[in-house]
Image: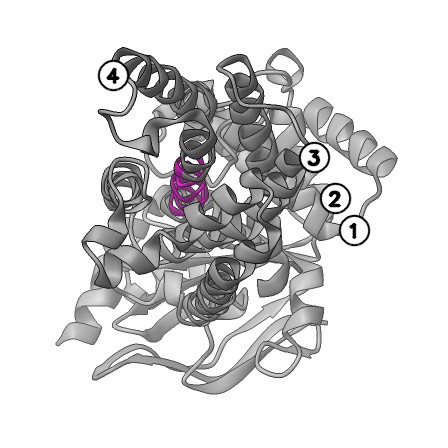
């Protein structure tokens, strides 16, 4: 119950910030519309097929999820700056309840983001199928990766630094490495690895369910490691204060 | 009964000793002020007593519970109003109060009733729907104390409660704190000597992590051989530095 109470408070704090709605929902949609328009202007057979809606939409949903890092890191960093977290540390809340309370509100947010992106993509020509529901489920572990990164950053850095790291650096890296702009397999190495999330989402949309898992295992692995790291760092911080 | 009893309570940060073998006893229902210049060890003492940081050695018992081995029992009977206002910025006054009541175990109905009681007690009716971020420093501080009181703590820690407030807001908070006297044990840290003198039952003066002297304001003035409390504080602190 305490976890849900804390999660409810965090939901209010995040959703009452208008920038959250702009960055979380509107910006990915604008990007989707813009890149679709660019794609339409390219003569058939001349441009990269990355901008086709069936490939673009899953990529944009994953890019949109990178803003979850900003939201989760900002709320923790703010709570630390204002000493609100100090007040909570003296309460009966346990470290696991803290982490869950910060994580839970962002899961429905991730689903809403994904749904809005795919609904928009339907209007841009993406065929409706049950695959989109699978793609939404595939996005959940991807969302956890971004949330866990935010929990880590928010526990370590201050509010100002977190804005730069999560807001500018991470969202740019996510965009560049996510296979939206160029085929990262042409570059190889680390670039190829970080594109697992988008590949899994694309396989889901294409209905190629067998192809989801090699990539999704990587994502789930990242999520587990990062969440464990976030819980550890937060608990250490709590103890050290 | 003793509300707080520390035994050789010590906190070291690498080579620096922030609190050194502190022996402190605070009686139930007492308002005890901890005074000291910056770096005296007041806030570290409060942090240890409120289970925010573990002592390097020693222990303290709050209503009989150890801050080292029984932190969950200690946390259930204390509350803290930290130095910063520590309110949830985008929550309204009422939401802030209900939130704290609920994480301490009240159900929705009880939390709502407790929040309404606090709003009435603290004359916050007009601002109950205002977001905390939009409130003045004085109102935020008032809300912060109400959030600490809503859980009906047996021991309340007020860490620099009037820091940064104007004279009027400070006086208002003094009246508020005066009304709490006797209802619970209160530990107050402050830089304002007149605040400690007028509000406290007893005062402890700390310097460099050590409790130099304690007693009522009158006893401390007599000990220092002066009628002026500020002068007494300076003499006691300077004597220790020599």
Asked if labels 3 and 2 touch by Cβ distance under 8 angstroms, the answer is: no
Q: Disc 2 sits on a residue from what chain? A: B
Q: Give the residue number, with chain letter if any, for mark 3.
A: A130
In this view, the mark in front (1 or 4): 4
Asked if labels 1 and 2 touch by Cβ distance under 8 angstroms, the answer is: yes
Asked where in the image residue B96 lies, by quadrant, the reply is: top right
Q: Are marks 1 and 4 on the same chain?
A: no
Q: CA distance from mark 3 to mark 4?
A: 30 Å
Q: Are marks 2 and 1 on the same chain?
A: yes
Instruction: Estimate how packed mark 3 is, as few (under 14), some (14 to 19) or many (20 or more) residues with alpha carbons within 10 Å.
Output: few
Assign the magenta stretch its main secondary structure: helix
Q: Give the residue number, with chain letter if any, for mark 2.
A: B102
Q: Give the residue number, with chain letter if any, for mark 1.
A: B105
Q: CA distance from mark 2 to mark 3?
A: 41 Å
From the top left corner, tell me how far across and down residue B165 is, in percent.
36, 29
Q: Compared with residue A51, is residue B146 higher up or lower down, i.e. above or below?
A: below
Asked if labels 4 and 3 touch by Cβ distance under 8 angstroms, the answer is: no
B53 drawn magenta: no
Asked if labels 4 and 1 touch by Cβ distance under 8 angstroms, the answer is: no
Residue occupying image coordinates x 46% and y 29% = A57
In this view, the mark in front (3 or 4): 4
Residues rendered magenta in the picture = A63-79
Q: Which mark is residue A42?
A: 4
Residue occupying image coordinates x 54% and y 13% = A123
Q: Are marks 3 and 4 on the same chain?
A: yes
Give the structural element (helix, strand or loop) at label 1: loop
């Amino acid at each position: 119950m305490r976890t849900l109470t804390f999660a409810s408070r965090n939901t209010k704090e995040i959703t009452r910030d208008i920038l959250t709605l702009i960055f979380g929902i509107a910006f990915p949609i604008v990007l989707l519309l813009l890149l679709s328009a660019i794609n339409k202007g390219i003569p058939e057979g001349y441009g990269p097929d990355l901008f086709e809606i069936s490939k673009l939409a899953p990529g944009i949903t994953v890019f949109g999820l990178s803003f979850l890092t900003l939201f989760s890191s900002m709320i923790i960093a703010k709570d630390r700056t204002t000493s609100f977290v100090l007040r909570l540390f003296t309460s009966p809340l346990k470290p696991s309840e803290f982490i869950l309370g910060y994580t839970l509100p962002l899961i429905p947010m991730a689903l809403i983001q994904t749904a809005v992106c795919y609904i928009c993509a339907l209007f841009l020509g993406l065929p409706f199928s049950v695959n989109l529901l699978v793609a939404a489920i595939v996005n959940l572990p991807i969302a956890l990766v971004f949330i866990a990164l935010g929990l880590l950053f928010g526990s370590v850095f201050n509010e100002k630094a977190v804005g730069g790291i999560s807001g500018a650096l991470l969202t740019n890296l996510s965009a560049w490495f996510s296979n939206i702009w160029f085929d990262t397999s042409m570059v190889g190495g680390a670039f190829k690895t970080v594109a697992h999330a988008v590949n899994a989402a694309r396989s889901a949309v294409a209905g190629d369910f067998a192809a989801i898992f090699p990539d999704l295992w990587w994502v789930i692995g990242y999520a587990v490691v990062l969440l464990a790291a976030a819980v550890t760092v937060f608990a250490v911080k709590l103890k050290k204060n | 009964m003793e509300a707080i009893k520390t035994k050789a309570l010590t906190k070291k940060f690498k080579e620096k000793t922030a609190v050194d073998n502190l022996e402190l006893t605070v009686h139930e229902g007492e308002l005890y002020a901890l005074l000291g210049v910056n770096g005296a060890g007041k806030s570290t003492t409060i942090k240890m007593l409120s289970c925010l940081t573990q002592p390097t050695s020693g222990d303290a018992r709050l209503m009989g519970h150890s801050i080292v081995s029984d932190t969950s029992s200690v946390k259930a009977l204390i509350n803290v109003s930290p130095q910063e206002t520590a309110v949830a910025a985008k929550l309204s006054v009422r939401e802030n109060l209900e939130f704290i009541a609920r994480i301490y175990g009240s159900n929705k109905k009880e939390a709502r009733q407790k929040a309404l009681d606090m709003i009435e007690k603290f004359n916050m009716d007009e601002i109950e729907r205002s977001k905390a971020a939009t409130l003045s420093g004085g109102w935020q501080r008032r809300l912060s104390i109400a959030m600490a009181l809503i859980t009906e703590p047996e021991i309340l820690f007020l860490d620099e409660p009037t820091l940064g407030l104007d004279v009027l807001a400070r006086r208002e908070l003094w009246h508020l704190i005066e009304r709490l006297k006797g209802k619970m044990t209160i530990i107050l840290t402050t830089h304002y000597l007149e605040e400690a003198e007028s509000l406290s039952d007893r005062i402890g003066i700390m310097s460099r992590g050590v409790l130099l002297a304690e007693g009522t304001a009158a006893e401390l003035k007599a000990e220092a051989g002066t009628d002026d409390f500020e002068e007494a504080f300076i003499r006691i602190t300077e004597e220790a530095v020599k």
